[in-house]
Image (tube, rainbow, N blue to C red):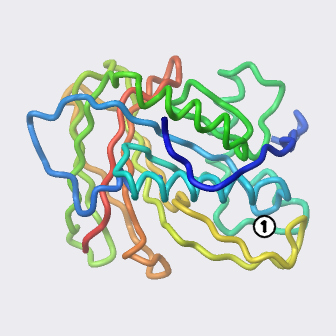
């Protein structure tokens, strides 16, 4: 069983009207580049959250607990916090939000046959979704995921780019479907934010593994490639990780994942 420390409680999800529409495996250092990598079970956790939603802070804390447990136990758990822009119209613009993340959540809503997206929502390996603050549901789903053999092996290698403010992410994938997509996410730990307006006005919020950059590329016939990430000076580099994962665009199932922490 995945050991998520401390307590948690489920909150009623925030429904979105139809008209309003990750760190690493927590192995320190860059993942070793190997031609012999084999698929290993994993849990890729996507939390859709917002600083403008009063129900979301408990889910943010739960994601932090998952991250802490993964780093402590060296589990292959890959948490990512996608901040959606859905609630920005309520008086507080989430500084980490991106419309692309809202569109990603909408894809899941259609795949799961939901009436509408909601926050907070967790999606694990693209196949299980639930209210993002429900610790007991998270524990069960994560335990199941960690017992499920992975289909694909993913290997990452991080290296400096020519530009001083850029990072190259080399990836290799084996065992994925030919039409698969590779997602490369740069995430930042320990992000603090003081919310001045909206439903969480006056609260100081802490976020873990906030998705700061997200790029998607087709896997391609060679099943390998390179992605360049530009790192703004506002990012705290010692808190950055890269999570790479492979998704079947037809079913939205995540078939393989890996991560690496920046050491540059």
- For this view, does 231 lie left or right of residue 253? left
Q: Residue at x 57, y 59 (%)?
A: 64
Q: Classify 247 as above or below 49.
A: above
Q: In terms of secondary structure, where does tag 1 sit?
A: loop
Q: Position of residue 83 (x, y in %)?
A: 66, 55
Residue 194 position within the rendered picture, expressed as x and y whole percent measured from the top left: 74, 79
Image quarter of residue 119: top right
Q: State the residue position of label 1.
A: 93
Question: Looking at the rendering, which quadrant does residue 221 occupy?
Answer: top left
Residue 136 location, x and y as percent? Answer: 67, 38
Left or right of 140? Residue 156 is: left
> Mark 1, residues whose alpha carbon is within 10 Å: few (<14), some, or many (≥20)?
some
Q: Nearer the viewer, residue 31 or 231?
A: 31
Image position of 16 (left or right of 254): right
Counting labels gives: 1
Question: Residue at the spot x=55%, y=34% of the render?
Answer: 124
In the orientation shown, which residue stands out farthest toward the left? 35
């Amino acid at each position: 069983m995945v050991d998520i420390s401390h307590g948690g409680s489920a909150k009623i999800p925030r429904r979105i009207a139809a008209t309003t529409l990750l760190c690493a495996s927590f192995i320190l250092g860059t993942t070793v580049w190997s031609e012999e990598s084999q698929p290993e079970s994993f849990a890729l956790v996507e939390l859709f959250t917002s600083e403008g939603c009063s129900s979301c802070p408990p889910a943010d804390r739960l994601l932090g607990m998952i991250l802490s447990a993964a780093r402590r136990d060296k589990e292959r758990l890959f948490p990512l916090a996608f901040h959606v822009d859905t609630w920005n119209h309520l008086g507080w613009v989430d500084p980490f939000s991106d419309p692309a993340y809202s569109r990603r959540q909408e894809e899941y809503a259609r795949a799961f046959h939901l009436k509408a997206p909601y926050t907070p929502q967790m999606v694990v390996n693209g196949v299980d979704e639930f209210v993002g603050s429900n610790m007991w549901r998270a524990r069960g789903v994560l335990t199941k995921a960690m017992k499920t053999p992975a289909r694909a092996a993913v290997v990452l290698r991080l290296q400096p780019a020519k530009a001083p403010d850029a990072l190259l992410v080399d990836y290799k994938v084996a065992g994925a479907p030919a039409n698969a997509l590779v997602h490369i996410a740069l995430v930042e730990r320990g992000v603090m934010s003081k919310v001045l307006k909206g439903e969480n006005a006056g609260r100081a919020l802490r976020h873990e593994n906030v998705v700061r950059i997200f790029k998607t590329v087709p896997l391609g016939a060679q099943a390998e490639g390179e992605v360049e990430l530009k790192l703004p000076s506002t990012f705290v580099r010692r808190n950055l990780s890269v999570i790479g994962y492979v998704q079947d665009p037809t079913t939205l199932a995540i078939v393989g994942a890996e991560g690496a922490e920046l050491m540059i």
